[in-house]
Image (spheres, rainbow, N blue to C red):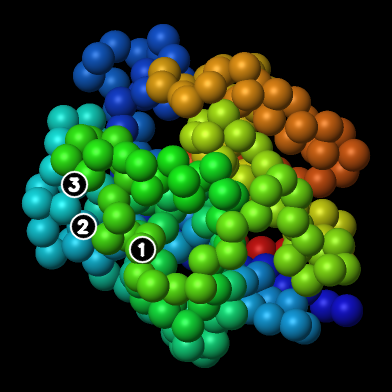
């Protein structure tokens, strides 16, 4: 069995440094972070882990971002939209079987609407929480990003997508109520696509949390899960680490 992985940059977000690392920098210090999306090709299907930014960021940034413009700015450069990334791999949006969203903040599911045939795999607590949010408040949840009438498969806890242990959703709650990461086993070993359970390498190394999290104790527990996987040989792909991201080959080159 051969599992292939590809990384795509599907946008950038400029955020205050102290939002990413609580207490770091002054109020004007910012960090420009990548918005990753990943394609996993398995003999039984093609999977996207997160889908990047919505095209609305490019066409109507302030209207789409609303109150979030006070805290961050998003950018989707030409060629960074999800369809363009897949095209570099000679794949079409209709070729995708599953979208596994780490969570439903706008920068992780903005491209979901571009893959209408894909089944969406999400932790049940995340789906319930997202749908309970007030759309008028700047929470990061935007129903137009994730509610497209797709087949939504709500899972609870660990979920083996293909039943062979090669692509497994693992609950890493804390950043949001139902955040999940994705563990992928390939011929060269194991990687974990951490999503926002771990923004940066520094987050994991020092247990240095962001300023705002849903549940700090849960997030620390999830970081310990990721530390345990790393200690057993898994390579962690951090959610928004610009320094680490520069070392990750971009599609059409394989990650591993």
Residue of label 2: 57
Using the rendered image of the protein, determine whether residue 200 is visible from the camera's viewpoint.
no
Comparing 191 with 147, the one in front is 147
State the image coordinates of residue 67 (x, y, percent, origin top left). Answer: 15, 36
Residue drawn at the location 70% of the way across and 24% of the way down: 221
Residue 71, quarter of the rendered image: top left
Q: Nearer the viewer, residue 155 or 245?
A: 155
Tell whether 180 sits left or right of 142: right
Question: Which of 63/237 is in front?
Answer: 63
Residue 154 in sight from this viewpoint: yes
Q: Which residue is mark 1?
A: 147
C-alpha span from label 3 to label 1: 17 Å
Q: Which circle, 3 or 2, is nearer the viewer?
A: 3
Instruction: Identify the residue under disc 3.
Output: 65
Q: Look at the numbered discs 3 and 2 and tell me whether their residues touch, using CB distance below 8 Å.
A: yes
**What secondary structure is marked by label 1?**
loop
Left or right, residue 216 beside residue 136: right
Label 2 crowd (10 A; few <14 / some 14-19 / many >=20): some
* Residue at the image position 29 percent from the left and 11 percent from the top: 26
Closer to the eye: label 2 or 1: 1
């Amino acid at each position: 069995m051969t599992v292939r992985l590809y990384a795509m940059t599907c946008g950038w977000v400029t955020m205050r440094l102290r939002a990413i690392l609580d207490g770091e920098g002054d109020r004007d210090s910012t960090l420009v972070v990548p918005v990753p999306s990943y394609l996993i090709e398995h003999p039984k299907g093609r999977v996207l882990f997160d889908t990047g930014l919505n095209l609305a960021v490019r066409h109507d940034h302030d209207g789409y971002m609303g109150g979030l413009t006070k805290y961050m700015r998003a950018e989707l450069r030409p060629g960074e939209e999800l369809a363009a990334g897949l095209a570099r791999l000679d794949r079409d949006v209709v070729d995708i079987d599953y979208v596994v969203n780490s969570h439903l903040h706008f920068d992780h599911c903005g491209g979901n609407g571009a893959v209408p045939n894909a089944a969406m795999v999400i932790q049940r607590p995340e789906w319930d929480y997202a749908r309970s949010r007030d759309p008028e408040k700047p929470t990061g949840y935007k129903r137009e990003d994730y509610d497209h009438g797709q087949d939504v498969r709500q899972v609870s806890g660990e979920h083996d997508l293909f039943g062979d242990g090669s692509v497994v959703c693992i609950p890493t709650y804390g950043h949001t109520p139902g955040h999940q990461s994705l563990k992928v086993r390939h011929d060269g070993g194991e990687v974990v696509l951490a999503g926002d359970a771990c923004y940066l390498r520094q987050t994991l190394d020092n247990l240095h949390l962001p300023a705002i999290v849903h549940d700090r104790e849960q997030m620390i527990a999830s970081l310990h899960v990721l530390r345990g996987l790393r200690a057993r040989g898994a390579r962690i792909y951090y959610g928004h680490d610009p320094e680490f991201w520069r070392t990750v080959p971009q599609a059409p080159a394989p990650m591993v």
